[in-house]
Image (cartoon, grey):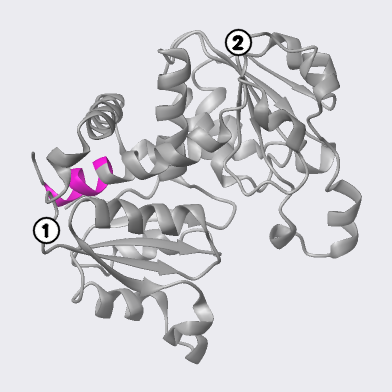
Amino acid sequence: MKNVINIMDLSVDEIEQLIHCADDIIDNPVKYQDACRHKILATLFFEPSTRTRLSFESAMLSLGGNVLGFSEASSSSASKGESVADTISVVSGYADIIAMRHPKEGAPLVASMHSAVPIINAGDGGHYHPTQTLTDLLTIHHEKGHFDNLTIGLCGDLKFGRTVHSLIGAMSRYPGVKFVLISPEELKLPSFVKQEYIKPRGIEYRQSTSLEDVIGDLDILYMTRVQKERFFNEEDYLRLKDSYILTEDKMKLARNDMCILHPLPRVNEISVAIDSDPRACYFRQAHYGRYVRMALIMKLLGVKV
């Protein structure tokens, strides 16, 4: 049994296989409509979610399977004080695979130690979000056709942004990749991410507090929101929430083939005027999440079509 807690749990070859499978699902959806018939996915979301939870559920239903679960901790026995370990010990007897989101870093890893079925981390606090990264990679694959020799700008909340941490880990394994880290001082990329992924591989990176100064150098701009739920006080959040807003004027400085990615939800960090720009990939990106999660569910359940 394999769990996916961190994107690095998957090898480069396994990621390429998942992308190939997702492409085939996009091209031949009928071929996969009964692939997981009589299988059950449990979605255990101790933290609110729209895209991740619904795309997991859509993925399993599109494979002919069934779904059960909860969408917030208050509607589970966690509200009565039940531990993650006990919840998982029970639910893994009801389902064939579990997708779990939790506000505490490391909770899905604890869950994997008590589960009789595969666990997929659907986001744990400010730590990791591997299936969002698979979604990001499928988007890059469709938009750029390759992963090597890309300059990737990551903008906004790099401190608490689990999607940023996971994407850096995944992309650090491809040759010629460069990172441009754009954030206010208070939301800089944590040193553990640099020490784990960037520095050991000698990857070129630079830090900037100005989006305008670097946007013209980027192949990919990965925008993130400043996450209110990660702050200890509202004063700090209000001071930083509008640090970076992508506007039409800033887009005039960007390359014609630059791709804008965003894990969503968007608050106001990308102007709605950008939505009609052909370089805006974030809604296509959200749709790709369904297909790559279908591929991952099949892989972890050992289903072949």
Decide if residue 270 is in sight here. no
Identify the residue shown where x is 42% and y is 58%: 54
Residue 119: x and y, percent? 30, 58
Residue 148: x and y, percent? 45, 11
In the image: residue 9, left or right of residue 159: left
Could you tell me the amino acid type at mark 1? Arg
Residue 171: x and y, percent? 47, 24
Q: Which residue is mark 2?
A: 257
Callout 2: SS: loop
- Of marks 1 and 2, which one's residue comes earlier in the chain? 1
In the image: residue 274, left or right of residue 17: right
Q: 28 above or below 78?
A: above
Q: Nearer the viewer, residue 172 or 273?
A: 273
Mark 1 in CB contact with mark 2 (< 8 angstroms): no
Identify the residue shown where x is 37% and y is 65%: 110
- Per the rendered image, the range of residues in magenta is 295-302
For the C terminus, the image quarter is: top left
Decide if residue 269 is in sight here. yes
* Mark 1: few/some/many CA within 10 Å (<14, 14-19, 20+): some
Q: Which residue is mark 1?
A: 37
Res 153 → quadrant: top right
Res 6 → quadrant: top left
Residue 301 on the magenta span: yes
